[in-house]
Amino acid sequence: MSIDDRHFIDPSSVYSLLMNTDEESAARHVQAFLRNKPHLMGQAQFTFDVCVAVYKNHRDDIRLGTPFLKLFNQYAKLVQDSYQGKKTFDLPSAKEQAQGLLSSTTKIIKSGWKKVPPDEYQERLGICKKCEFLWPGAEGMLRCGKCGCMMKLKAKYAAMHCPIDRW
Ligand code: SF4
């Protein structure tokens, strides 16, 4: 288990734990790691829930180190960054976000990683910037309070849509 200088749990460490032990033992290990680090609890629990969900459904992808894992890790870091010193009100629960992330990532893969043209991407972000559901605790990342996703990443992909159909 490791943390870097920005203080988030490295998802690769969680995967290693899951590969070398079972979910219950891995959860115990994570809890022990966090015992004296209450400031890491929210983000770490989220990361753990996401890693377990991903591990159960995409074990082979993780072993192969596919782009799936790259996208997931990129997303997990953005999510964890947004927790730093911020409130987490108005966001779906960590488990709901984990399921949403898993479902979104699967759709992106099935679409062949298809992206929208740059002007459509900017149009999407413009709508989010004016939206009343944009979460105020993640400046610059455009985090949606409805789905918990980071719009700067999610809005790039053609298979992704606004949860309330604004784009
Ligand atoms: S994805 Fe939809 S609900 Fe979320 S911030 Fe953007 S416009 Fe608002």
Image: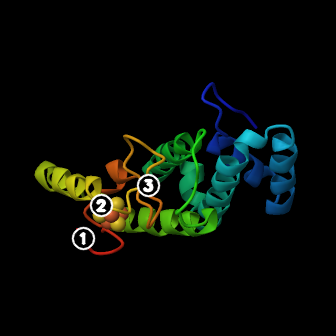
Q: Residue at label 2? A: 131
Q: Position of residue 158 (x, y in %)?
A: 25, 63
Residue beneath the point at 73% across and 47% down: 41
In the image, the residue with mark 3 has its CB under 8 Å from the nearest atom of ligand 1: yes
In the image, the residue with mark 2 has its CB under 8 Å from the nearest atom of ligand 1: yes
Q: Is residue 133 left or right of residue 81?
A: left
In which of the image's four quarters is ligand 1 placed? bottom left
Residue beneath the point at 36% across and 49% down: 142
Look at discs 3 and 1 and give the one toward the viewer: 3
Q: Secondary structure at mark 1?
A: loop
Q: Secondary structure at mark 3?
A: loop
Q: Quadrant of residue 58?
A: bottom right
Alpha-carbon span between mark 3 and mark 1: 16 Å
Q: Is residue 104 left or right of residue 164?
A: right
Of all residues, the one furthest to the top in this rendering is 5
Q: Residue at label 1? A: 166
Q: Quadrant of residue 18?
A: bottom right
At label 3, counting other C-alpha atoms closer than 10 Å, the crowd grade (few under 14, some 14-19, many 20 or more) is many
Q: Quick one: label 3 or label 1, which is nearer the N terminus? A: 3
Residue 74 visible: yes
Q: Position of residue 90 (x, y in %)?
A: 52, 63
Q: Residue at label 3? A: 135
Q: Secondary structure at mark 2?
A: loop
Callout 3, which amino acid?
Trp
Alpha-carbon span between mark 1 and mark 2: 9 Å
Mark 2 and mark 1 in contact (Cβ < 8 Å)? yes
Callout 1, which amino acid?
Arg
At label 1, counting other C-alpha atoms closer than 10 Å, the crowd grade (few under 14, some 14-19, many 20 or more) is few
